[in-house]
Amino acid sequence: MARMVPHRDETELAAHRPASEADAYRALRDKTPNEWLVIFDKRSIAQPAAASPTSIQTDFIVFVPEFGFLIIEMKGGLLKIDDSTGKWTRLNDKGQANEMEDPTAQALGSLKMLIS
């Protein structure tokens, strides 16, 4: 059972949206070794040189002693990427496509925040 920061009880997880993040929290908490550290829903402010501050939210940062760390950016629903444009879309419950931020760019932003 990994160490989870912050700790969330079942009442908090049941209320968390999206539910897929709560499911991943439970899986990481219950199915990973004790040595792992999982930081959940980390919010930070980054201010690159000569730029305005930017808010960054990271779903999961997982520290694995033998390997390093990984960043997990959760996305729910049916996702599509247009290979020619690189644009990501998510289908809503009515089947309509809505453009969304590139999750790999989100994870890269989190990585830059962590190492700077």
Image (cartoon, rainbow, N blue to C red):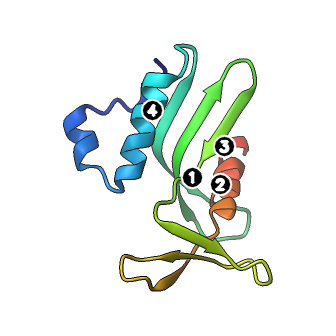
> What residue is at 46 percent from the left and 65 percent from the top?
77
Q: Which is more foreground, mark 4 or mark 3? A: 4
Name of the residue lying farthest toward the front: 95
Q: Which is more foreground, mark 4 or mark 2? A: 4
Number of other residues with Cα within 10 Å of mark 2, as a class: few under 14, some 14 to 19, many 20 or more: many
What distance separates the C-alpha of mark 1 from that of mark 2?
A: 6 Å
Q: Is residue 82 left or right of residue 25?
A: right
Number of other residues with Cα within 10 Å of mark 4, as a class: few under 14, some 14 to 19, many 20 or more: few
What distance separates the C-alpha of mark 4 from that of mark 3?
A: 24 Å
Q: What residue is pinned by disc 1?
A: 73
What distance separates the C-alpha of mark 1 from that of mark 3?
A: 15 Å
Q: What residue is pinned by disc 4?
A: 27
SS at mark 3? helix
- The mark nearer the N terminus, 3 or 2, is 2
Point out which mark residue 107 bears: 2
Q: What residue is pinned by disc 3?
A: 114
The percent position of residue 73, horizontal first and vertical second, equals 57, 52
User: Do the residues bearing badges 1 and 2 touch, measured as CB atoms within 8 Å?
Assistant: yes
Q: Amino acid at mark 3?
A: Leu
Point out which mark residue 98 bears: none
Q: Amino acid at mark 1?
A: Glu
Number of other residues with Cα within 10 Å of mark 1, as a class: few under 14, some 14 to 19, many 20 or more: some
Q: How many numbered callouts?
A: 4
User: Do the residues bearing badges 4 and 3 touch, measured as CB atoms within 8 Å?
Assistant: no
SS at mark 2? helix
SS at mark 4? helix
Q: Which is more foreground, mark 1 or mark 4? A: 4
- The mark nearer the N terminus, 1 or 3, is 1
Q: Amino acid at mark 4?
A: Ala
Q: Which is more foreground, mark 3 or mark 2? A: 2
